[in-house]
Image: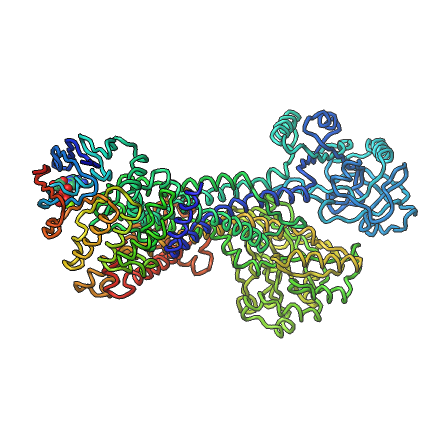
Amino acid sequence: MDIILSAKDVTRTYKVSSGQVEALRGVSYDFENGLFYAVIGRSGSGKSTLLHILSGLDRPTSGSVEVNGTDFTRYSDTKMAIFRRRHMGFVFQQYNLLDDYNVLTNITMPLTLDGRRADQDYLQEVTGMLGLSDKLAKYPSELSGGEQQRCAIARSVLAKPHIIFADEPTGNLDKKVGEDTMGLLRDSARRFGQTLIVVTHDLDIARKADQVIHIEDGKII
Amino acid sequence: MEMNGELFKLSVRALKRRWRQAVLLFAVLSFSFGFAVMTIMINGSMEATNRAYAEAKYGRYDILIPYGVPEDREWLESREWLLKLGTTVSYGRLALDKDGRNGPSIGTVDQGFIELGHLELESGRWPEYPGEIAMEESKLDMLKLDKTLGGTVEFTIYVPTNHRGLYVPVQRSFKLVGIIREYADGWNYLSGGPRAASRTPASGAIITEQDAQSVYAEAGESVGQITYEENGETVTATLSPLLYQYHIIRDKDMSRQARDELQGYMKKAGRLGPTFNDDSNIQSIIGRSAEATSYYSTLILIVTALGVICIYLLRVRSEAASLARFRSLGLTKRQLLLMVFYETVIIALPAFVVGVGLAAGGTALALELTVYAGSVPVRVTFPWKKLMIAALLWLVTVVAVRLAAVFVSLRTPLTGRIGAPGRRAWLIRRLNRALIWTLTVAVCYTALLTFSHSRIYLYDLFYTKEAATNATVSPKGDEGTVPANTVDRLRLVEGVKNVWGIRYFVTDVMGKALEERDEYTRQTAPVYVIDDADLEYLIPFDDLELICDSFSREEFIAGDSVLAVSDSNFTLSFGNDLDFDIINSRELLFPVGDGVITARVGYGGKFGRAVYNTQGRDIYDLPYYDINDGEFSGDHLWGILCSESFFERFLSSMPEGQALDGVWTAGERHDYNKAVMTFYPGATYLGAAEEINWIVDEAGLRSNIGNLSSAESYRRDFNQVEIQFLAGGLCVMFIIFIVIFSAMALEAERERRSAGIMEAIGLSKSRRYLKRLRSTLKSFLSAAAVSMVMIIIKEDFYRPYLEWLEEDFRYNGRLRTLSERILDELLSCAYGNWYQYGGTFWRFAIPLGICFAVILAASVFAGGRVTRGNLTDRLRDEQ
Ligand SMILES: Nc1ncnc2c1ncn2[C@@H]1O[C@H](COP(=O)(O)OP(=O)(O)O)[C@@H](O)[C@H]1O
Ligand SMILES: [Mg+2]
């Protein structure tokens, strides 16, 4: 068994005006390389928090997260940023595209920031697969929600990260478009051998996952 | 590094995408920086120009000791700061006027004085051997002496005694070896700046020291035989000590030491202190301007900072969000800073360059248009050090504000919908409102300050064209004429408004009351008699027609009406009542019908317009604009301009030297022709002056055009004060207006979505505008009130009012009621002199009105942007 990502006793507490919220209360889990994981649970159960910590967007209050045996949670901001753009891809529910740049610049951004160039063949393949080939010169504000999300997916895939995280990627899309988009995400991950961790409400999607992680009240059950 | 290049490209692309904003920012940055630099540059340039002016006019950093003694020389020569010393000694007079005071003098000069006093020869050489003399041509004319070089001149030298008006005559003859050029300036230079009571003339005849000593010795022998009565006793006269004048050039870096030492020395010797021409006149003006320009430079920098903050702040939310998204994709902190740096530099660097260009061009243009510096070219300096400091301050502000966005983005969690959370957004909006409000206060304050502070100068600015100055062209001797064709040529000079030939008489007029007070001795009123032919040139005199609305040429000729204008200046100090004494008594002399009117205007710093009644109608004076602000002293003009036939009667009705109802008249008659011309001391002045001098030289005449001190000081004051306050103030206002406009526009851009939602649920556009208007009005009124309070508590604002109150109390024994005061205020507005003391209401209302109009326009403009585009687009909009 090839463990790529493992969370060890991860907790996360938020300070709020009324005291503390324990979003995660000791989560431990090992993720195998190349599998498709679905994270499900009720709203407010801690799914997003978990995903943010696993992807290095946020840090745990205690516990550790290891990629290929190295704990990255104690990295400096800079090291973390570099680590993120090399190893992690992220698809947000709200897309979070950069409004000032066109689609092409947006999807190649993680590579650009890393001082790398996109492999042209690969770029064509990804954009072709996601149906973005004729939209590369457009700006995010000119795209529909589904197109924006496919753009976000392309962005997360293109840098060939080991792991792709997606937080309710289809939450803002209608059922049909959502299913298509999810299909594309799954296909591309499988195709390039990437581990895919998706938070979703959609049980149809979860059913297609290799593993389903159920979270409730900050714990995996 | 290749990576940096990529980041740079990304920055460029982002800016391109947001080009509207970028251009706006660029405009604000370059304008504001440009103006800040411009105020600094004007300051430096005026300082340099003034220095050059001082050098040209006064030799160079000079000091004059007008009443010196021989011992001074040794002391002066041992001074560390002394660079050059010139001495002139007066031994006596060539002729005496009635009370033996002001006749031209004869004496010696040393080489230093020739140089420093700018003495030049028309022909021949300076006397070298005993028995030789060099003289001014006019002095030769006056004494009716032969003007050929090498010829013999013989005359009496009057050596002064210790008793006023008593002289020892010494007969002498000399060989004429040189004709001294008559100087308008260097020859008869000012000894004490504008406030000095007397001019100290250099001698009009120069002889060798041996001769001078022998004259003095001879006078010394015979003075013992001269006696005079004093308090009933007979006293033997003695010679008065010789009058030494020292002209000093000092080291400019040691001005303080020179001043202290000299003042100490003079005080110890119990003599009058020396005057410091450069320091006292010109430096004080520089001082004033420096103060104001640094004030405005600072204000501009602050306003720029506020503007930059304002504009970036509006973007902080979206910018921080976008930076945070970058971070989520793995942008390191270093890269983040680099990117922000690039984005800043891409705008700021060209703005810097354009700003400097704007400033250089603007300064050159402003100075070119407004500065007159006599014969000295106006200098435009480039103050590198100050510029660098300003640039640094400015850059620091810009970078600091940008960094704020970086720090906000670093605090933004990289989760969910990345962007500033609600509370922070609210705070930013509040802050933005507060900034716009502060800017409104700043603009109201600046407007009030600028318009109220420079109210006098503002008036001058618009009336420069009418601030005509006069010059005269006259024959070199006391007799002779200005040929008609010269007059015609002078008329063609650009900028010369009119020229008329006149015969010129001088009448002394003295008020008895003045004499009792011993406040001043004598006024000389020139009487100008105009040929009928020249009336042609008088009648089109715009001002005259304009102001004397009931005046007509026919009546002037037929009825012998006399209007008075003048080209003579006096520095006097007296109150209204005295002046009216003179006028009233003159009216006794020349009853209504003869229509003698004196122009009595522009004293006391007030713009007065005296109205005199003659032949049953009102005739107003010519306007004269006083350059003094608010002091009861100043240039006072008067004189009489009349027709020939009138003048005959004038003379016959004026008993010489007799008291007539409180007025002394005496007729010292200079019966020569001269051409009087009027022209503007405006931009055409320099060229006009040159051309006039050229014509005058060619015709062998002389003019006083180089000596138009009133015009010069007028221009000097104008330059300094106008530029600093008006330009500075307007610059600041302009920048603030740009900033307010852009800030409101950007704010509106952000409001589009929420406004769209409101509209979608039924808020009409007109209601939206109304809402906007109400909030604009509210914030403007509060800002205006704050700025007004800030102005009112400034001392120079309320001081005149305190003085008014004090005067009221002193003269009336009570304070005027509020209603009286308001009435007075309104009346003074009506008279057009609100810019001086009165018109408080308008002084507030006009600047604030302008500000309100602009801010309202900005608000309406922004309102238009909020509702621009179709509703669905706006609902989709998110920044
Ligand atoms: N930034 C935050 N500050 C305070 N509390 C938070 C924050 N983010 C999430 N939480 C809280 O943590 C809990 C888990 O949130 P989240 O992981 O977003 O849930 P899910 O994604 O499963 O809906 C919730 O109770 C939520 O209110
Ligand atoms: Mg969630």
Left or right of B198: which side holds B2?
left
Q: Nearer the viewer, residue B669 or A137?
A: A137
Q: Position of residue B141 (x, y in %)?
A: 83, 52
Q: Position of residue B800 (x, y in %)?
A: 43, 46
Quarter of image, ligand 2: top left
Q: Nearer the viewer, residue B225 or B379?
A: B379
Q: Nearer the viewer, residue B439 or B746?
A: B746
The quarter of the displayed image where residue B71 is located = top right
Q: Residue farthest to the right?
A: B151
Q: Position of residue A194 (x, y in %)?
A: 24, 44
Q: Quadrant of the N terminus of chain B?
A: top left
Q: Is residue B108 above or below residue B368?
A: above
Point 22% across, 54% down: residue: A184
Point 36% across, 60% down: residue: B853
Left or right of A25: which side holds B647?
right
Left or right of A44: which side holds B391?
right
Residue B551, visible in the rendered structure:
yes
Residue B576, visible in the rendered structure:
no
Applied colour scheme: rainbow
Q: Is residue B76 above or below residue B50?
A: above
Point 24% across, 41% down: residue: B413
Q: Position of residue A143 (x, y in %)?
A: 27, 59
The quarter of the displayed image where residue A62 is located = top left
Q: Nearer the viewer, residue B153 or A208?
A: A208
